[in-house]
Amino acid sequence: MKVLVVGGGGREHAIIKKLRENPEITQLFALPGNGGMTDDAVCVPIGATDVAAITEFAKKESIDFAVVTPDDPLALGCVDALEDAGIPSFGPRKNAAIIESSKAFSKELMAKYHIPTAAYEIFTDLDKALDYVSSCPIPTVVKADGLALGKGVVIAQTREEAAAAVRSMMEDKVFGDSGSRVVIEEFLEGPEVSVLSFTDGETVIPMVSSMDHKRAGDNDTGLNTGGMGTIAPNPYYTPAVAQRCMQEIFLPTIRAMKDEGRTFRGCLYFGLMITKDGPKVIEYNCRFGDPETQVVLPLLKSDLLTIFRAVRDGKLTETPVEFSDGAACCVVLASKGYPGKYEKGYPITLPETVDHEAIYIAGASRDESGVLRTNGGRVLGAVATAGDLQSAVTAAYALADRIHFKNAYCRRDIGRRALQAL
């Protein structure tokens, strides 16, 4: 069986490694993949947003199943194009991917179907947005409506910061057309929880909860990044909270999308805040999170391809989805300077991994002599699983400390907040 995975980051590497456990798969392709994936998949230099080229490749190679993971190709209709070409695919169609590609859409969906979220206003006029932030409660959250590589959110602590964020998005177009419309919303307080879920449009099966660490520096200081590490499970996601989320958020969201004629099949990511008034939605993603995937999939006991096919075929209720009772930790090793300017091209030395360890490559290339070199801000994730969270954190850092490249840096407090909550 020939399987294609669209994307080229650490998330895709984690998915590919999990798919390799299925003996039915005879060949795995990554489009475009990266130099650190070449032992696990055939990397093909076709960009993740080149939908036409992806579709042509899939037809030419007689791909049996495709997995589309990044937000951009999903929003562009990559699954639609593949399915129309006769290639069974995992991921939402374009009309369902809008739940992430338009924050205004998702906020209006939640308001219409009474799904708990932060109070908000939507603006397409710069002056009206500036007038609003001149008197709204502070802190406030300013979001670019469209996709912005996970960087289109500003938590403004002052009115000046809020006005600057609005101007940068709407006037300076720092995120292009994604900032033509902005959502300004209430600042929520409480622990954050990430919950990835499998859904076939009828049934929703949450995966193990996780906790991301977005800031570049220890103690949540510095700039926002794509994620400097994760742990799973999240101790704030108690059984009681999980039950409320299922009844008040997860099922209502799936039903709302179906009622809107936008049936969602794929992985739906729920970014949650556990407030004093209960869980509320911060954001939806129409795909696996990165680096949440890197701690969730190592705990999955069931076969991933079987689940993907069940999601696509509407047979999730018939398919067992089981996770281990242990814990996982991912420590991201980044290039010094990320998420700002950084240098690349440095050789990477990787250790041998053992059971319960994994290295997922996110930003690397191979030179002509086969040497693996840094080629991105977030270079790789060092992941370990164990019977308890403290052991997983200790093992992940022990693995990270055996990986070497010039200008490498990582946060040293991944998991600390979660351990304090236990």
Image (cartoon, grey):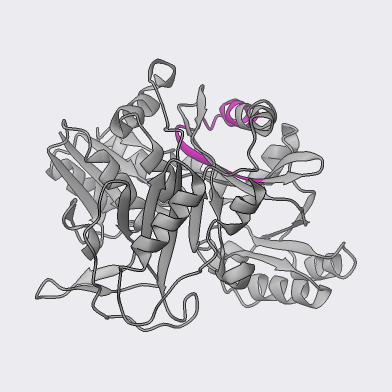
> Does the image show residue 380?
no
Closer to us: 135 or 234? 234
Nearest the camera: 52 or 304?
A: 304
Q: Classify 298 as above or below 371.
A: above
Can you give x and y, in whole percent of width and height, for residue 113 in the image?
A: 72, 31
Q: Residue at x 50, y 51 (%)?
A: 390
Task: Say which residue appears at 78% left-offset and 70% top-offset.
Answer: 157
Q: Is 351 covered by the magenta stretch? A: no
Per the rendered image, the range of residues in magenta is 252-272
Q: Give the quarter of the figure containing the C terminus.
A: top right
- Horizontal side, residue 387 vs residue 99: left or right: left
| 193 lies above or below 85 | below
- So how many labels did they put on this image? 0
Above or below: residue 264 compared with residue 409: above
Front residue of 134 and 214: 214
Horizontal relation, residue 59 to residue 134: left or right? left
Nearer to me, 104 or 138: 138
- Picture coordinates of residue 4 (x, y %)? 23, 44
256 displayed left or right of 132: left
- Quadrant showing the N terminus: top left
The percent coordinates of residue 394 (x first, y second) are 44, 57
